[in-house]
Amino acid sequence: MTPFPDIADTLHWPRVHTIGVDGMLVCFSDRLDEAANRAALAFRKALEDADLQGVLETSTSLASVYLRFDLRMTDHAAMRAALDALLHEDDWYMATLPTGRTLWHVPAVFGTELAPQLDEAAAMAGLSPDQAISALCAEPLRVQAIGFAPGQPYLGQLPPEWDIPRQTGLTPQVPEGALAVAIRQMVLFSVSTPTGWRHVGQTALPLFRPDQPEPFTLRPGDDVQFVAVTREEFENIRRNDTLGGATSQMAD
């Protein structure tokens, strides 16, 4: 069995890279697409189920899996061999998504002064504002990764017309719960922050709850479908529902 090539080989995927003194990164692509994200999610679950000796933690990014291991229990060569063997067990790009995922329905108000860049983003996508709202709420979007801030999801992928660039400048501040769009993805902000992504919607969903046993509301692999509500409905939800009106069920 030939090991998967390392970073020097630009023709083959996946690749296993050494990260620091006690980490490895299994990369399924150098760009985001559905297959690479599916592979990362499925492989991480298989890695956790395999319970390889010495593995201390795992995490996923958009198209890769990171693992940290204990050098007192294993070494780089043994870990690399174990990863190569696991990679050969399946076509991870076609693998079934892990079970236990959740489908969330999340109310959002689009446009208004709460989300002032809807019209601009819609125009860049070649859509009217109403068409843009319908498109953004049409299908569930996968939580492709959690990152940048605690509990913050990157959601996608949107159809090709939403391959719009980030802004060249920064919006000084968007609030917690802001829903922003760029490069065929949506970001749901878990904290108030500056951003170069266009602010098109606003939710009241709390994404980081440090007082809870599971502090992150969403997990990689979950699905999120946005439900358009009026400004009045949104304000009522924000006042009266600690989960921002979100409901959940087991994903298929």
Image (cartoon, rainbow, N blue to C red):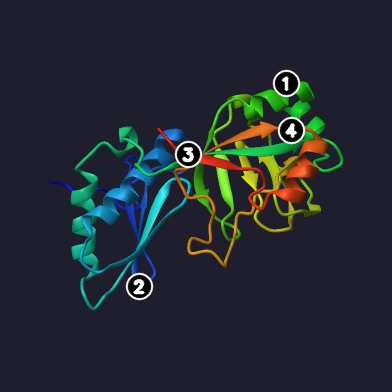
Query: In which quadrant will I find the C terminus?
Result: top left
Can residue 202 be seen here? yes
**Outermost residue, left side:** 1
Mark nearer the N terminus (3 vs 4): 4
Mark 3 packing: few (<14 Cα in 10 Å), some, or many (20+)? few
Mark 3–mark 1 distance (CA, rounded to whole Å): 27 Å
Q: Which mark is residue 229?
A: 4
- What element does badge 3 sit on? strand
For the residues labelled 4 and 1, say whether their Cβ atoms are less than 8 Å apart: no
- Residue that badge 3 annotates: 249
Q: Which mark is residue 131?
A: 1
- Residue that badge 2 annotates: 21
Q: Residue at x 59, y 26 (%)?
A: 160
Q: Residue at x 76, y 40 (%)?
A: 234
Mark nearer the N terminus (4 vs 1): 1
Mark nearer the N terminus (2 vs 1): 2
